[in-house]
Image (cartoon, rainbow, N blue to C red):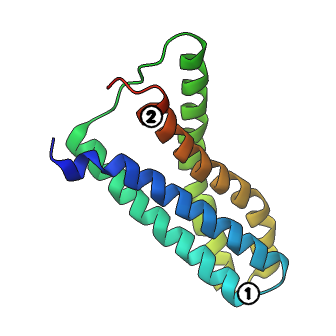
Amino acid sequence: MPTWIALLPTLNALLNAISAGFLLLGYGYARRKRRGPHMTCMLAAVGVSVLFLASYLTRHALAGMTRFAGEGWVRRVYFALLSSHTLLAVAVVPLVLVALARAFRGEIPAHVRLARWTFPIWLYVSVTGVLVYLVLYHWFSAA
């Protein structure tokens, strides 16, 4: 496997961490009613998440799946983490798109109502993405 493909899981974890950072910054700006910086952070989180998705799909198209090497109770914990991460990653996409659409249309109360659900789900997906990487490639690596 070419070296650049082997580096994609690390890049993906980094992109997830950056996305989580932008989400937390954006949330802080929203709490302080600073719309401009909030919007900048949230659009950056979307952009980084799109880059993550492109990198993730490229990695899996070119190298396939990485098998989890852990055994026993840690295997059950890992697959519970992975399952919740994957399910919520799929579910959060339409929530993010609708929240963005509402914000751009100026429907701020509707945006805020949806963002109260979207933000913690998206943050969970970003943080658990990093955890999945650490468990799969560092803590319980087959290599």
Image coordinates for residue 73, horizontal then vertical, percent = 60, 13
Mark 2: give few (<14), some (14-19) or many (20+) Cα within 10 Å. Answer: few
Which residue carries the number 2 mark? 138
* Of callouts 1 and 2, the N-terminal one: 1
Q: Going by the picture, which residue comes out furthest to the top?
A: 72
Establish if 21 lies above or below 61.
Answer: below
Disc 1, SS: helix
Disc 2, SS: helix
Mark whose residue sits in front, 1 or 2: 2
Image coordinates for residue 129, horizontal then vertical, percent = 53, 46
Q: Is residue 60 left or right of residue 33?
A: left
Q: Is residue 34 left or right of residue 45?
A: right
Given residues 139 and 27, the one toward you in this image is 139
Name which residue lies at 55% across and 57% down.
17
Q: Are the residues tagged 1 and 2 within 8 Å (C-beta)?
A: no
Mark 1: give few (<14), some (14-19) or many (20+) Cα within 10 Å. Answer: few
Locate the N terminus and report the quarter of the image it occupies.
top left
Which residue carries the number 1 mark? 35
Image coordinates for residue 80, horizontal then vertical, percent = 60, 27
Image coordinates for residue 68, horizontal then vertical, percent = 42, 24
Establish if 14 lies above or below 30.
Answer: above
Q: Is residue 25 left or right of residue 14?
A: right
Given residues 118 and 22, the one toward you in this image is 22
Q: CA distance from mark 1 to mark 2?
A: 39 Å
Name which residue lies at 27% across and 52% down.
58
Query: What amino acid is found at the position of numbered circle 1 in the picture?
Result: Arg
